[in-house]
Amino acid sequence: MNIFKKKVTVATNEFNQVVVGNSLTKDAWRRLKKNKMAVIGMVVVIFYSLIAAFAGLLPIYPYDEIILDHQHLPPSLTKNAGELMRVKKMEDLYAKAWRAGRLVVTEEQDAQLKQWVKDNQNNKVWEFCYAEGEAQRAAGTFAFNSSEQRTIDRLEEKIATELQVTVKHVYWTNPETSKRYDVQKMDYKEMLELYAKMFNVSPQAVEEQTEMEIRAQLLNSIKATAPDFTDEEYAGMVEDELKKLGEKGYDSLASQNIYGKIVTQSRRVVEQELKTIVSDTDTKFPLKETFGVGNDMTAQVEASKKHERRYFLGTDYSGRDMLSRIIYGGQVSIAIGFVGTLTSVLIGIVLGAIAGYVGGKTDYFLMRFVDIMYGLPYMLLVIICMAVFGRNILNLFFALALVSWLTIARMVRGQIMSLKNQEFVEAARSMGASTGRIIFKHLVPNSLSVIIVYSTLRIPAFIMQESFLSFLGLGVQAPYASWGSLVGDAVASMTLYPWKLFFPALAMIIFLFAMNFLGDGLRDAFDPQSKNQL
Amino acid sequence: MTKYIIRRLLGIIPTLFIIVTLSFFIVRIAPGGPFDGERALPEVVKRNIEAKYHLDEPVIQQYGRYLFDVLRGDLGPSYKYKDHDVNYFIAASLPNSIVLGLISMMLALVFGISAGVIAAVKQNTWVDYTAMALAIVGISIPLFVISPIMQYVFAMKLKWFPTSGWFTSGGGWRSVVLPAIALSFSYFADVARLTRSSMLETLRSDYIRTAKAKGMRNSTIIFKHTMKGAMLPIVSYLGPAFAGILTGSVVVEQVFRVPGLGKFFVQSSFNRDYTLIIGVVIVYSVILVIMNFIVDIVYAQLDPRITYK
């Protein structure tokens, strides 16, 4: 029986040249490669996806690290945060001096400045006063008074000495065996003892304190999701929650709590120690070292000068780095786009295939349901769901995936209906293949090219919908970011801080462009006759 | 035809019934009630409020009451704004949204069809490429990005138009320009692409060749013969476009502070003002369903090849 084996024969034409068969995908790939825009689009999409996938390995600042001193720093390729802070302070001082009449400007300039103030364009006032003030100070016609000078000196000292210390690991060395243990991996009881020793208190007191804190923490999280109950009801809920956690869950919460405190204390000790050597010019920052923090404990820390950071794309209202927020925001957006499309396509394939193959009443009801859903403003339903069930990434994802399988279901149904009466299906059926096998082994793979093309065009739409909700404040919530929420955060203050709007918008537009070109290219490649259609 | 219209009208009923039911129950199964403020109310007060809004009844009874009220055209009281009911807010804001939506739709159609026709007639020239590049831009830039950027460039930097406001609140016609253009942008792009491809297809058909062979003027062929046939896909696109414009107006009204329905919708979804949320969704759905109905009828009228039984 060799009809099940693939017979490999080399076909030759009349000139005895080998003729190689060309599969549909191979043919499509050849056509796609000819389409320049689609190839560029593909390269861009791959680049974005790689960055999003390996965001954790990139040398960027954490996306949720809040440094209040660095609020709203403008993007700069040359200046570091300290220099920008200094400029900002000086701008402020010069503008104040102008208002007090100490920075003398010509009458025309004065009128112009007042107009800017009236138009709410304070950044122009600052810019002008800074340029003018620096020039006058260099020429000797303007000098800071003593209190201003003191402010500047204090700022400069702060810029020169302040450190950002991050504790990576805390270790405890057993004095008897001199073996080193990672504190984070210890269990709750051991951690408790270390902590008690560190602060010189009894373990019981620590235990009680921790329990109180965990209860408070649980209460807060319950209150956030279910507001407005009486205090007794809340107390009951907390008990329920504790019971649900069990001993193991409780211990892990408690050890997280204590570990956090140990880290804070270690950081404090290290900061004290570093203060003495920061002015020492021999020490190179950023440094990565291990310091003893007392009681046989050591902390491995990374310390860098806080104000030597560089923000190429500026910072936001909490001093978070825009570059890393855009990258991590892209990660969220792209992930939701890909995974959401995949989910909705899977739902659509299954339902569409069943409707198309089984037909009859199943088909009728499924398609009437799809028709009715089509008639609804379903984005509004998604908004209701987000408002009602809480705004987090998971809800967003489900709400979107549940309404976006409609078109693909219709398409797959159409494909399957046109395929199901062909000979190869009949052959399969006559050989006793089950319905499931026929659908998923024969029919679905044959309509895959349509599905792939549609999915690629679906991804940008999905990303746009996700970002649309996040823009309205109904999607991804801080500290997480998505492109939509970044744009949404920026809109209110875009006159003063335009970089907060432009960079995320640009990142997003480039990706959507690339995705659309790639989708168009794929469609043309798989179905050359559709070249001139939408 | 009359039969078809009647059947389509009957088909509207289940759609509206489903939307009312869906939104009613989504909102009811939500954790947290509408009167959950930061301040806990005394038990008696809470009970009184619930009795006033019939929230103490079983859900089925509430649902029946709500269905009955909606049938009479009463969308109930607003939970947050105690002095007004939902009908009041909708009456005040719906006209603004409708004006905005219609202007945007007109802009999208007029400019989209013109661009598409020109691009098709001058296929593979720089006109075609420019129009299609513009269309790709329109499709790729989301509404919530184009709106603030237009506001920034044309209102704040160039000062051609006011940054926000509306003509009913003394903004003048200029205040309508930016929101309308922003909202119409992506639909302009879709309409242009659709028109172009459909024009190209029709231009290749036999009856156009016949017309050319008969020596007709080019303009007559394009405007009288080709466009008539090529408009059919545009008409069927109008349905989804209306849905998109309805949803999109939420963003535009937010950015340009237009006192429309969309702004209320976002506000009420933050406030958990349940009756207002459901009310707005019902109004939007009714508009959408009516628009789809009109589109279907127009389509049937335009295309003699379609027969409805």
Image (spheres, coloured by chain):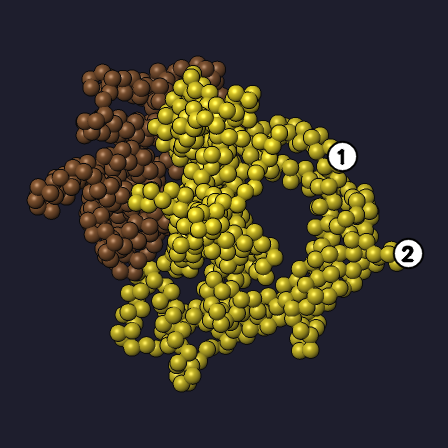
Chain colours: A yellow, B brown
Split into 4 quadrants, where in the image is the C terminus of chain A?
top left
* Chain holding disc 2: A
**Looking at the image, residue A292 lies above or below residue A348:** below
At 56% from the left edge and 51% from the top edge, which residue is drawn?
A: A53
Label 2 sits on residue: A177
Which residue is at a point 25% across and 17% down the rendered structure image?
B309
Which numbered disc flags the more N-terminal residue, 1 or 2?
Answer: 2
Q: Check the image and name the residue furthest to the bottom.
A: A139
**Circle 1: is it few (<14), some (14-19), or many (20+) Cα within 10 Å?**
few
Looking at the image, which is closer to me, B60 or B139? B139
Note whether B237 is above or below A202 in the view shown. Answer: above
Query: Where residue A159 sits: x, y (%)?
Result: 57, 70
What's the mark number on residue A296? none
Seen in the picture, residue A159 relative to B26 is either above or below; the reply is below
A427 lies left or right of A220:
left
* Mark-to-mark CA distance, 1 and 2: 31 Å
Quadrant of the rendered image containing residue A274: bottom right
- Give the quarter of the figure containing the N terminus of chain A: top right
Q: Chain under label 1?
A: A
Residue sitting at 76 percent across and 34 percent down? A247
The mark lying in front, picked from 1 and 2, is: 2
Q: Is residue A238 or residue A321 the one in the foreground? A: A321
Residue B102 visible here: no
Q: Who is closer to the viewer here, B56 or A13?
A: A13
Residue A182 seen in the figure: yes
Residue A439 rendering spot, x and y as whole percentages: 51, 27
Residue A499 found in image quarter:
bottom left
Q: Residue at x 38, y 70 (%)?
A: A127
Q: Quadrant of residue A382?
A: top left
Instruction: Say what amino acid the circle numbered 2 marks.
Output: Thr
According to the image, label 1 marks what residue?
A: A247
How many discs mark residues in the rendered view?
Answer: 2
